[in-house]
Amino acid sequence: MKRVFVMAVALLLASAARAEDVMVFAAASTTNALNEIGEGFAAKTGHRMVASYAASSVLAKQIEQGAPAAVFLSADRKWMDYLADRKLVTGRVNLLGNALVLIAPADSTLATVELKSLGGLLGNGRLATGDPDHVPVGLYAKQALETLGQWAAVAPRLARAESVRAGMALVERGEVPLGIVYATDAAVSQKVKVVATFPGTSHEPIVYPVALVAGRDGAAAWAFLDHLHSAAAKGIFARHGFKLN
């Protein structure tokens, strides 16, 4: 009996030694869903997901500079392409999709907004979204506003945020009357409401590619990438409003 106990302890210690932290750099809009997925991943594999959430542009630059990420989940193809062009990622696949919406504070008197009249509606107020110079949601927003003929009127009134969640926070606090975020972000906040949805034809398809960071693509990282494709993970993403590719 004693020998069996010793062997069991040895196996547990060996298993613990093999458990690893998987550093995941992910777009801010995936925060809620990915945290939940990370819990399931730990329960299933013993490995622990450690996540850093920010704008995809910021994360891609950090990876380029040597940040210890093992997995990168981007909110657009541009920043994944940026790393791919530098041969810094491997195992790339398009994982998710999303939609672009216009939000207002939950207590706003606005019910619905005609998007082609957005510029005139703002008045002296500002429109919050990610900085269109580099934050994916801002890039999509600029495309949509240009398509709808509203960019020239809106651009001077833009509150350029460092990420989609930072832009939504401005609307939540009532600092701006309107904001452009992903549908999934609006869905997790009780402090905002959707007043319009941008047509999918007004901007490039919103695609979330995921890949492993070259040189850090060990067994645990591959296990996490595999877990993202599991039925459990897909169910969580779907429940949070993401489109599955």
Image: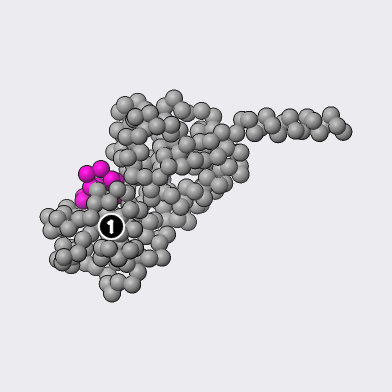
Is 149 situated above or below 43? below
Q: Is residue 179 above or below residue 51?
A: below
Find out whether residue 57 is within the magenta segment: no
In the image, farthest residue toward the left:
152
Residue stretch rendered in magenta on the structure: 132-143
Q: Position of residue 12 (x, y in %)?
A: 70, 34
Residue placed at 50% from the left, 33% from the top?
Answer: 221
Vertical side of 117 occupied by 62: above or below? above
Is the magenta region chiefly helix, strand or loop?
helix
Picture coordinates of residue 160, whole percent (x, y): 24, 51
The structure residue drawn at horizontal position 21% and vertical position 67%, both measured from the top left corner, is: 114
Query: Residue placed farthest to the bottom in the image?
Result: 109
Query: Where residue 180 sits in the image (x, y, percent)?
Result: 28, 57
Quarter of the image where one finds residue 198:
bottom left
Residue type at mark 1? Ile
Which type of secondary structure does the marked residue at label 1 adopt?
strand
Residue at image location 38% in from the left, 50% down from the top: 29
- Would you call the spot at circle 1 few (<14 residues within 10 Å), some (14-19), or many (20 or more)? many
Name above or below for residue 196 compared with residue 18: below
- Tell me residue 164's x, y (percent): 32, 52
Q: Is residue 142 magenta?
A: yes
Residue at the spot 24% in from the left edge and 68% down from the top edge: 113
Asked whether, in this view, residue 12 is left or right of residue 2, the answer is left
Question: Is residue 52 among what the camera can see?
Answer: yes
**41 to the left or right of 65:** right
Question: Which image quarter holds the C terminus?
Answer: top left
The residue nearer to you, when weighing 9 against 87, is: 9
The residue identified by callout 1 is 180
